[in-house]
Amino acid sequence: MSGAPVSEGDKGKANGVGKALATHDLDGHHLPPSPAPSTPRNGRKYALMTELVYTESNDQYNASSVPIYQSATFKQTSATGGAGEYDYTRSGNPTRTHLERHLAKIMNADRALVVSSGMGALDVITRLLRPGDEVVTGDDLYGGSNRLLKYLSSHGGIIVHHVDTTNPEAVRAVVNSKTSLVLLETPTNPLIKIADIPAISSIVHTANPSAIVSVDNTMLSPLLQNPLDLGADVVYESGTKYLSGHHDLMAGVIAINDSALGDRLFFTINASGCGLSPFDSWLLLRGVKTLGVRMEKQQANAQRIATFLESHGFKVRYPGLKSHPQYDLHWSMARGAGAVLSFETGDIHVSERIVESARLWAISVSFGCVNSLISMPCRMSHASIDEKTRKERNMPEDIIRLCVGIEDADDLIDDLSRALVQAGAVNITPDGFRALGAGQVLGEGKPSSAAASG
Ligand SMILES: Cc1ncc(COP(=O)(O)O)c(C=O)c1O
Ligand SMILES: N[C@@H](CCSC[C@H](N)C(=O)O)C(=O)O
């Protein structure tokens, strides 16, 4: 029983754009329809699952795999303006261009730019800011993003407002004529909170037409959500995660529809030298082609694991669960729930023991990889947010984040069951087990065979 909200394919929407991967929830009910797609860009003509793998190459030998132009320089025909399309790889490289065109197509953008990491992408966007400018962002966001914004506020003269982005009115309350950038994560990492991209974009653009709404789409990837179609001006993602899928490269992607804004962002990339290398561009292009099959399996597995934990009484945060407080909002914007979920145990030491008892789940930061990971964000990915701030922002110290891969779901559940039992996180009865601590008890569950014997 998979039970995941994943449909059989992705055909059926006009021009194949914005096609819903999920049509039914666990109980077989229809999910809300996906948002209407905007005009397809970049000649996109097939369903997204097809466009992910379909690339057109103008290689002279018709190579099926785009060549890696591992060259820093390109010869010119004269000293005075004789450069062809490329002169120097920091400014442009054919392998990188091929990847950027492919990403623009699948992100439904006019232009995509690739850089050396997700943080590099955010850095390029924040170079649009000037001292005195204001930024509005969430009270739950990736630790590295928080660190960069904190640095800009202490060293760059930027005023940063952290508000509850689940409430558009909280954004309205702080947006003003000095607001230059509104930065949203949805779902957030790691508390899986949802921001209403259309409502917030409309509030921001009405209050200050020159403010830029930027969405970090790392948690879902373009397969599941297209913020540019929902009112955002800029979307960026860590290509280190789902886009590449194997934790073998670092990359960041920025996508835009405004050509003047694209030129300003490209200027920074060329001037600062953070464009993605030819080899990493090639690796990322290869990874993107399997994004569809990877994500379908990952979110099917995530749905089973979230359901397993919730049914054993744990407080689980996952937008594929009806209990998520913003379930309807999430599904009005996205075509899937992704494969990152978090849950609480009520005791930081119990959480530590669970993480350290898992065998199949690697203790590791990051997500979006084909293998499953387990972590404690307050100790790992979000440790750069100090304890006081974490407390002010209601970040549970015991929270465990699961980043689900493509393994067999029963193996993952067995290993997790064994870790829960070994860590003393559950109360074992002759009929099954239930969460101890903070978890709300939703029902009895039977320990898996591994847990019972382990
Ligand atoms: C939501 C989110 N955005 C951005 C980043 C930054 O990406 P990168 O590690 O590729 O710099 C990360 C993780 O690192 C992340 O989790
Ligand atoms: N030591 C790193 C931690 C990277 S966290 C990576 C990823 N975004 C995640 O959420 O797991 C740092 O401090 O940046």
Image: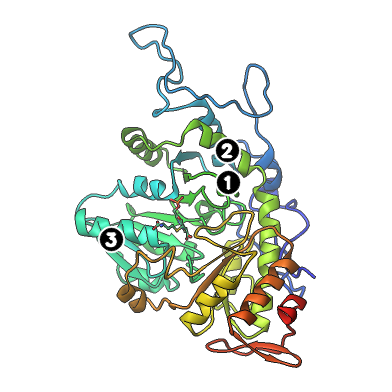
Is 399 drawn above or below residue 336 in the view shown?
Answer: below
**In the image, what residue type sits under mark 1?**
Ser
Residue bearing mark 3: 150
Query: Which residue corresponds to mark 1?
Result: 244
Structural distance between the alpha carbons of marks 3 and 2: 32 Å
Q: Pick the residue in front: 324 or 245.
A: 245
Disc on the earlier residue, 3 or 2: 3
- Which quarter of the image is occupied by the C terminus? bottom right
Q: Which residue is mark 2?
A: 283
Left or right relative to 425: residue 210: left
Q: Secondary structure at mark 3?
A: helix
Q: Where residue 129 appears, x then y in whole percent?
A: 27, 50
Label 1 to label 2: alpha-carbon separation? 7 Å
- Residues at circles 3 and 2 in contact by the CB criterion of under 8 Å: no
Residue depicted at 49% across the width and 66% down the height: 196
Residue 182's x, y, as percent?
36, 59
Residue 296 seen anywhere in this rendered image of the structure:
yes
Which image quarter has ligand 1? bottom left
